[in-house]
Image (cartoon, rainbow, N blue to C red):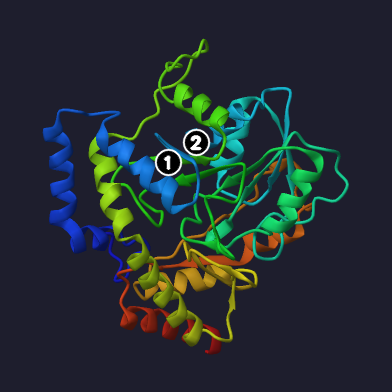
Amino acid sequence: MNGYKIKFNGIDRLYDAYSWRLASRAKSAWKSGDVLQGKYLKQLEIEIAEKYKRKYAIGVGSATDGLYFAMKAVGLDKSSTVLCPVFSYVATAGAIKRLGADIRFTDTDKQGNIGDWGIMGLPSAVLYVNMFGNLADYTRLRKYCDQHKIPLIEDAAQSQGAMHGKIPSGALGDVSVFSFDPMKNMPSFGTGGMVLTDSKDVYDSVMSLRRHGTKGSTSYGYNSLISEDHANQLLFLLSKFNKLQKMRAKVFKRYRKNLFEADLIETQENTQSSHHKLVIQSDRRDELKAYLQSKGVETKIHYTKTLDNKNVGQYPNAESICAKALSLPIYPHLKMEEVDYICNKIKEFMYV
């Protein structure tokens, strides 16, 4: 126990809901004799590709590895320049730095997604993030990249389950990357990621990179795999994913109903969010966080600063979110009475 009445992350409740099934899945993998690169990972890749309308899906050790492999697979290297939003988890920029490429940061819109990059010179590729599970302006991004014939890479770590019309997140880039981190919408009880693409060349490259450069490649690679027990557990969670997403959306609607006057970060029109995070903005954010903590509610700040520490003051939208945003608990097994309790405490703080 962490001392909170209502914890921020509900993975323990997810496990409690499906404990014997998840344990059984792990045992089946162990009994198969295959620890890595067996039938369960292959089946997971097939089902992910089918569900998210891609030709190929490749399981990797983490989404961070996936982003790095994606950039290498589309031909980027240390001579490249990658356009990237300045507001994200550090792993987004970290993958570019690992490549050795230059990062061209751009401010966000008011929802935290990649904003107007203006006339900044042509980058080698665009790496964008669907922040908090809300989709960025894919139509504008796709048009820009097609016009200039550069790759569009979707960091979909937070947006599995989101939709742009009839197109799912995971299919909103030349290459897309999911995360199965324990904090994500389809969490592994370990770690993992998935690279999705329609390109056979990208598929072959990532398949080689994830396993020490094997599969016919002449270059070196890395050790980046999802274990068979985790893959089999993820197969089960994938079968429950739509149900869990509906439960998560119900929690969001309850928050929205109770906090109709609050400044919540929401998705753009004509898109469906994954509701990965529920983010409220307040000029008294730190006070609100402390107040909720005193009432037994755990919250998080995503994030306290932008990815560009050298140019403070140049990113007004992103810096505003850094100063005001507070993430509230949201997960499928959060009870409605718990949501009501959190909302009532926020109202107490706002109006007293």
The kind of secondary structure element at disc 2 is: helix
The picture places residue 44, in percent across and down from the top left corner, at 33, 43
Q: Is residue 196 visible?
A: yes
What amino acid does circle 2 point to? Answer: Gly
Name, please, the residue furthest toward the bottom. 352
* Res 351 → quadrant: bottom right
What residue would you read off at disc 1? 193
Furthest-top residue in view?
218
Q: Is residue 202 above or below residue 57?
A: above
Q: Earlier in the sequence, mark 2 or mark 1?
A: 2
Q: Tag 1's secondary structure?
A: strand
Residue drawn at (85%, 43%) of the image:
120
Q: Residues within 10 Å of mark 1 (few under 14, many from 20)?
A: many
Residue 352 versus residue 44 in the image, above or below: below
The percent coordinates of residue 243 (x first, y second) are: 33, 67
Of 319 and 237, nearer the camera is: 237
Question: For residue 127, which quarter of the picture?
Answer: top right
Tell me whether circle 2 and circle 1 mark residues in contact (CB < 8 Å): yes
- State the image coordinates of residue 165 (x, y, percent, origin top left): 59, 66
Residue beneath disc 2: 66
Which quadrant would the N terminus be assigned to in this image? Answer: bottom left
Decide: is 281 above or below 83: below
